[in-house]
């Protein structure tokens, strides 16, 4: 089990086999347990299913947690100290995909907030995704039945909109994609 005082790399991360799910942000380990709630899983499954169906005959691929996303700094090469497992990752550059997951920034990431991860997703992951050039970041708040859509503009996230359960979400990256939040949150 990693010590949160120490700094670790992806190489260290691969050695941890304690039955827990871990992430690394700037070398600091974050435990991603416990398992998400049933409602979290249901909402996540609905969103994933819509993206999977939409991307079926397109060049982008969608992945569901657990799926390692390695976000290396330029000086880190293969041994990054940033490893996350977003709830949903969409990758449009096949060169970023390997047998271990994604090595580089996904084009779109969706995180479904849990009570134990909300602050982490809104602060640490927000900053990490922004600094690594993730083009769209969706933050799904089950409690309030909202989805906040953030788009990268000149290296910084701007809020496109906050959508409620009566809205349909569209994406800047995928023109013809829309997601009915009423169906997601029912």
Image (cartoon, rainbow, N blue to C red):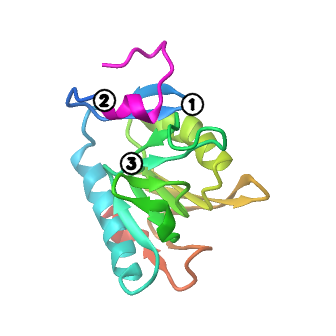
Give the spatial CA distance, label 3 vs label 1.
15 Å
Q: Quadrant of the N terminus?
A: top left
Q: What whole-number distance in Å separates the C-alpha atoms at marks 2 and 1?
A: 18 Å
What quarter of the picture does the C terminus occupy?
bottom left
| Horizontal and vertical percent position of residue 119 | 51, 33
How many labels were placed on the picture?
3
How far apart marks 3 and 2 lie (CA) works out to 14 Å
Pick whichever, 177 or 66, lies toward us.
66
**Are the residues tagged 2 and 1 within 8 Å (C-beta)?**
no
- Residue labelled with disc 1: 26
Q: Nearer the viewer, residue 100 or 20?
A: 100
Magenta region, main secondary structure = loop
Can residue 175 be seen here? yes
Q: Secondary structure at mark 3?
A: loop
Image quadrant of residue 72?
Answer: top right
Residue 47, picture quadrant: bottom left
Q: Are marks 3 and 2 in contact (CB under 8 Å)?
A: no
Specify whether residue 8 is painted magenta.
yes
Give the residues drawn in magenta, as a range.
1-15
Say the numbered circle drawn on residue 68.
Answer: 3
Residue 67: percent from the left, percent from the top? 35, 52
- Local SS, label 2: helix
Q: Which residue is mark 2?
A: 15
Q: Is residue 157 left or right of residue 182?
A: right
């Amino acid at each position: 089990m990693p010590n949160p005082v120490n700094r670790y790399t992806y190489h260290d991360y691969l050695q941890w086999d304690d039955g827990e799910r871990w992430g690394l942000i700037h070398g600091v380990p974050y435990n991603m347990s416990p398992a998400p709630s049933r409602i979290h899983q249901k909402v996540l499954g609905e969103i994933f299913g819509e993206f999977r169906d939409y991307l079926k005959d397109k060049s982008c691929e969608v992945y569901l947690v657990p799926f390692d996303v390695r976000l290396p700094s330029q000086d880190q090469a293969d041994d990054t100290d940033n490893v996350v497992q977003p709830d949903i990752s969409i990758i449009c550059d096949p060169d970023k995909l390997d047998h271990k997951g994604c090595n580089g920034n996904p084009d779109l990431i969706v995180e479904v907030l849990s009570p134990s991860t909300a602050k982490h997703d809104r602060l640490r992951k927000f900053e990490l995704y922004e600094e690594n050039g993730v083009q769209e970041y969706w933050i799904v708040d089950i409690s309030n039945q909202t989805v906040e859509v953030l788009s990268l503009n000149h290296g910084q996230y701007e809020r496109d909109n906050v959508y409620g359960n009566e809205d349909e979400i569209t994406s800047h990256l995928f023109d013809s994609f829309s997601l009915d939040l009423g169906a997601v949150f029912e």
